[in-house]
Amino acid sequence: VSQSRYATDIVDKGKLFYTLGPTKKKKSVSAFSDYFRYSMIKATGLAWTDSDALCLSENFTKNKYFFASDISKGVNWVANGTIVAPKTSKLISFLVESAEKTLMEQDLYSLKWGTLGPALLAEGVDKFNLRKYVVDSDYLHPLGIHEVLLPFNRSKAEEVKRRCKDSASLHLFNAILSEKSINKNNLPRGSFLHQKAQEYELIARHRIVTGK
């Protein structure tokens, strides 16, 4: 990226909004983040990846389209944590316009979590016949949404390492961790995340606590 941009260059701060999180116990910016990422791609043509994704490899696609997936009950579902698409594509126009239409017509606090995210992206992917660009969940999201605590569990470190062996990233599902009030900077010694923090020399620089 040759030049940094402020988020307000993409979406005016007056358009920031909150909805209820996945457990409906806390306010969340997840839906706004969904809208923002589509707007960002349309404005810049850059790829989007969630900031709660831990990079494990440099081997990313050079395809003009590229989408992540999550696994649930043995089925791969389109996920919007990583999105590569041309800024002038019909898909991106559809996502921005559909999100804006939904925001105008629906009460924000009745908006179901994921409506503007995976559900809308999946609709667009199918509408424009892009399903072949959806990668298997093991490649970007090797752990499912119900396994968010495994990377913090020292007794599961080897299992997580094995399941991430051929993955390019690990999605940490920040929205779920926040709902569970998990301190993401407290990494139990020996856990997969603690090992990665040591490998990437992050512990001293980012005030990461190494718990017992």
Image (spheres, rainbow, N blue to C red):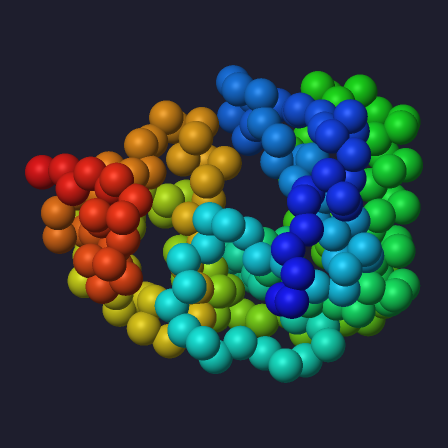
Do we see residue 17 in this rendering?
Answer: yes
Task: Judge left or right: residue 193 versus residue 128.
Answer: left
The quarter holding residue 171 reads bottom left
Q: Residue at x 68, y 80 (%)?
A: 63
Q: Residue at x 78, y 29 (%)?
A: 15
Q: Nearer the viewer, residue 9 or 134?
A: 9
Task: Judge left or right: residue 155 versus residue 106.
Answer: left
Q: Position of residue 92 (x, y in %)?
A: 82, 58
The quarter holding residue 2 reads bottom right
Q: Residue at x 67, y 24 (%)?
A: 18
Q: Is residue 141 above or below residue 168?
A: above
How many callouts does the rendering have? 0
Q: Is residue 27 above or below residue 194?
A: above
Residue furthest out toward the front: 3
Q: Position of residue 13 (x, y in %)?
A: 74, 30
Do we see residue 125 in this rendering?
Answer: no
Which quadrant does the C terminus fall into? top left
Q: Position of residue 130 (x, y in %)?
A: 77, 71
Residue furthest out toward the left: 212
Which quadrant does the N terminus fall into? bottom right
Task: Judge left or right: residue 152 versus residue 69.
Answer: left
Q: Position of residue 142 (x, y in %)?
A: 41, 62
Q: Is residue 103 above or below residue 143?
A: above
